[in-house]
Each structure stands twice: as C-alpha cells, then as structure tokens.
Amino acid sequence: MSETKLYGNMMQLGTGIEACLEKRLVAPALILLYSAIDITSWLASDNPNASVRDYFTGWVQDYMLPSKPLGCNALELYSARCGLVHTLTPDSRLVERGGVRRIAYAWGTAKSSDLQSLIDRTGWSDRLVAVHVEELYEAWRLGLLAFTEELQENSQKATALYERANKFFDNLAAEPVEALLGRDDRQAKNV
C-alpha cells in the first residue's frame, strides 16, 4: 500500500505542476515543484534529525543535479525554495547574508541561456543565475527516477522509504465513507 501511495502522490504532484505550467501559473508551479523536492528529499533522508536544508540539498546534489545539470547549485535551489514557499519572493536569509545567487526563472519558450547571457552582460552573474522552470521540473523527475532505480537495488532503504510514504496524505471518495457509515448505522440499530 505505501508503494502505491508513494508513486500515486508523486504522479499527482507532477500532474499539478504540469497543469500550472500549462495555464502559465509559474509561481504556483514553482511552489509545487519545491514542495515536491522537499517531500522527495524527506523520504530519502537517512537521518531523521537532519534539517530540511541538509536533506533538501543532499538529495538535490545526489540525484537532481547529476541527472540534469542546471546553472545553479543545491544551496541556491534551497534558497529559492525558501523565498518562494515562505514569502513568494526571490529573497531568503541565504541571499541576504550573501554567498548564494537569486534564481531568475525563464519559462515557456524563453531560453535560460538567453536570460543568463543578459545577466552576464549586466555584470550581475555574482547575484543572479538563470534556470528554466521546465528544466527544473525535468531535473526533479529525472532525479526521482534515479532515486527509485536505486531503491530497486536496496531493499532496506526501500522498506524505510515506504514506511515514511505510508504516512502520506490520503483521501477517500465519498462512497466508501458512506458505505462505512451505513454499516455502522445498521450495527447500531441491531444493538
């Protein structure tokens, strides 16, 4: 059951991201995407006491970036995630303290290479890095694929992951709930 929950929920997240992209809802697509990375990295974490930053950046470094290199690093993605998810801005404490660049997103038919060229020409390459939203999504999907392939070879890790996935949000259709309530009502009348 938890394996079904895992793959079902990952597919739903992907479908949600794609629906947002189709409707040109870039910020909601990114928020869902960063949440998907959060969820995936939590599942993969071997250390239950690790910080969100540690397991997020670890998973991105181990699975996403090797699967689909982007112009940014794992800490810059984490910083972007913090800004968007918490304040709907490109700003985070990591950006404010220096040391990480803000991500400037290309989307639709725009090319991240063109945006990066513009950033480089303005002399802001130490403050901004271009990433295409759909390439970021592809990096997550490919990273997830690489991770699930690894799970097939490591049954101990798979078992731990499926136990975590068993905690996933679940929903029930109205019919099973009504059927269960109907049985309870009949049982109560017979008592």
Image (spheres, rainbow, N blue to C red):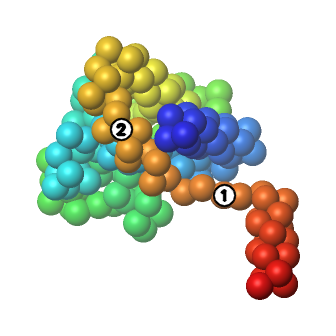
Image check: 39 left or right of 138? left
Q: Residue 73: image x %, image y %? A: 26, 33
Question: Label 2 belongs to which residue?
Answer: 161
Q: Where on the picture, by quarter, is residue 176?
A: bottom right
Quadrant of image for the C terminus = bottom right
Q: Which residue is mark 1?
A: 171
Q: Nearer the viewer, residue 131 or 171?
A: 171
The three-letter amino acid code for the residue at tag 2 is Leu
The quadrant holding residue 12 is top right
Instruction: Please tell me which residue is depicted at 28% across the width and 30% down the height of the picture.
Output: 157
Q: Nearer the viewer, residue 6 or 84?
A: 6
Q: What secondary structure is found at the residue carrying circle 1?
A: loop
In the image, is residue 65 above or below residue 131?
Answer: above
Left or right: 5 with respect to 182? left
Q: Residue at x 44, y 60 (%)?
A: 85
- Mark 2: which secondary structure? helix
Q: Tell me the distance, in whole angstroms, between the alpha carbons under discs 2 and 1.
A: 20 Å
